[in-house]
Image: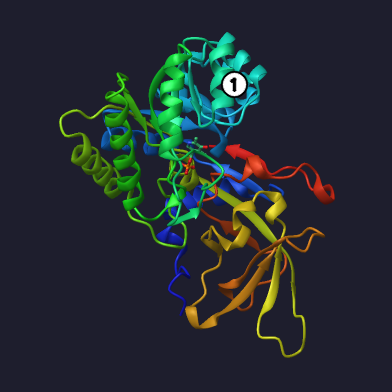
Amino acid sequence: MNPLSAENLFDFISKKNFKKIKALASGKQTPFLLIDLKKIARKFDELKQSLPFAKIYYAVKANPNDDVIKLLAKKGSSFDVASIGEIKQLLNLGVHGERMSFGNTIKKAADIAYAFENGITLFTTDSVNDLKNIAKKAPGSRVFLRILTEGSGADWPLSRKFGAHPDMIFRLILKAKQLNLVPYGISFHVGSQQRHIGQWDSAISQCKYLFDTVKNEGVKLQAINIGGGLPARYLQPAQDIQIYTDEILRFLEKYFKEDVPEIIIEPGRSMVAEAGVIVSEIVLISEKSKSSQHKWVYLDIGKFGGLIETMGEAIKYPIFVEAKRSHKDSREFILAGPTCDSVDILYEDFKYQLPKNIKAGERVYILTAGAYTRSYSSNYFNGIPPLQEFVF
Ligand SMILES: *Cc1c(COP(=O)(O)O)cnc(C)c1O
């Protein structure tokens, strides 16, 4: 048996919650995403308890649903935003710009001006041109300088595209001061769904190095933004969040001793993923030849319906049908989406186990689906509407 294949639906969701989901799902046309707001509230409380000194900036892109934002705003969260669209949405929901950080290093001068006019004075950058734009359009603001991380160990790495080498960051810090900005601190993102906790160790050690070197130049940095990367429970195992936060705390104390700076954390996936279940339906089951070993199961949701993180089979969602059959009655299947694009295959190398007598029309539950799904779903490709989302 494949060590990744989950035996039991109830390892991932409580019986009570699953019953609720079935009740909410009945009569609704699939596919759709159901979000349990109470679960998100619990995740927020847990993180706050494990890192009481850290300020939480929820990464809006993970799930920008209005009710999710309203809930987190009420609980005291701040927000990491990436575009004018996200800023407008949050302003409309009553979140003040003071509670937002413009974390995207790739932005137009006009975006910076809009953010600043609306009260945002905290920006992240990794290039001299963006820094100059910030100095011009958001004078006097605080800036985080983002260091490059390699992203290895992450199921969904963000490497290469963001951040700069410490030698460049060193120069940007001095440049920020020269431009009358406040070089506020160092930020990084170790890669999303990061399974190697040691990646925070090396990133924090680089922060310490930069704190020390710029101090010699008369700049006192005040904060570290440790980004996202905390995991959610998919098929591939990851440690509990508490183990991550204990380790991160240990790394901070190892390098900074009694002088740990202000800490900002930007959870996305870990805050919302486990609160979401996608309810889908089998469209068709087919065999490519009389002798082929695996049948294909086509679902009514695929890469274009919101499951883009199956690219390279990176994220392996726990996927179940409702009826429980004994293990000896299950088979390995290839899973694919419904659209006319051949990249719309979900899992071909990794084979999911499903009961051998599954049928078209049967419902399929895709768990841990609350992050990076709805917002990635396409706009009527093949006439399929964007993934519907309901909160409860
Ligand atoms: C996407 C993103 C996050 C959230 O990352 P997760 O791995 O989902 O927690 C945090 N910070 C920044 C700057 C991001 O772009």
Q: Is residue 275 left or right of residue 24?
A: left
Q: Image quadrant of residue 76?
A: top left
Q: Is residue 364 left or right of residue 143?
A: right
Q: Is residue 294 left or right of residue 232?
A: right
Whether residue 4 is visible to the viewer of this picture, yes or no, is: yes
Look at mark 1 in the image and give the residue it sits on: 87
Q: Position of residue 240 (x, y in %)?
A: 32, 51
SS for tag 1?
helix
- How does the figure colour the protein chain or chains? rainbow
Q: Residues within 10 Å of mark 1 (few under 14, many from 20)?
A: many
Whether residue 146 is visible to the viewer of this picture, yes or no, is: no
Q: Image quadrant of residue 40?
A: top left
- Depth check: 88 or 102 in front? 102
- Depth check: 263 or 232 in front? 263
Q: Position of residue 386 (x, y in %)?
A: 73, 42
Q: Position of residue 82 (x, y in %)?
A: 58, 29
- Vertical comparison of 337 with 277: above or below: below
Q: Residue furthest bottom?
A: 291
Q: Residue furthest left?
A: 258
Looking at mark 1, is its residue's CB closer than 8 Å to ligand 1? Answer: no
Residue type for callout 1: Ile
- Vertical comparison of 33 with 6: above or below: above
Q: Image quadrant of residue 105?
A: top right
- How many circles with numbers are drawn on the protein? 1
- Vertical comparison of 387 with 89: above or below: below
Q: Position of residue 257 (x, y in %)?
A: 16, 34
Q: Residue at x 33, y 36 (%)?
A: 207
